[in-house]
Image (cartoon, rainbow, N blue to C red):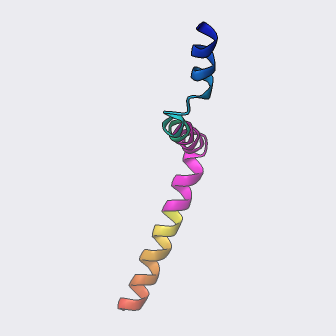
Amino acid sequence: MRRKGIKNLLRDNQGMGTVEMILIIVVLVGLVLIFKNQIMDLAATIFQKISADSSAILA
């Protein structure tokens, strides 16, 4: 009886999608925390370029 319970537990895939999504989110958050300064610098550079280009178009 106990063996069937263990086999069923090992074969049960319910919730695996949720666990995978949580792991992906954890990895992404970790990458953002590691590269936070580089991401902020890149975003600032992009927005400065957009602002400069839009000023040139409007002028």
Residue 27 at x, y percent in the picture = 59, 39
Q: Quadrant of the C terminus?
A: bottom left
Which quadrant of the figure has residue 50? bottom left
24 magenta-colored:
yes
17 magenta-colored:
no
Judged from this view, the residue extending furthest toward the left is 58
Residue 17 at x, y percent in the picture = 52, 40
Start and end of the magenta stretch?
A: 23-43
6 or 42: which is nearer to us? 6
Q: Is residue 55 above or below residue 38?
A: below
Q: Residue at x 56, y 42 (%)?
A: 24
Residue 53 at x, y percent in the picture = 46, 82
53 or 6: which is nearer to us? 6
Residue 55 at x, y percent in the picture = 39, 83
Q: Residue at x 53, y 65 (%)?
A: 45
Q: Residue at x 63, y 20 (%)?
A: 7
Q: Mainly helix, strand or loop, the magenta region? A: helix
Q: Quadrant of the N terminus?
A: top right
- Side of 33 where 55 appears, left or right: left
29 or 42: which is nearer to us? 29
Judged from this view, the residue extending furthest toward the front is 1
Q: Is residue 43 above or below residue 8?
A: below
Judged from this view, the residue extending furthest toward the top is 2
How many marks the image carries: the answer is 0
- Side of 58 where 48 appears, left or right: right
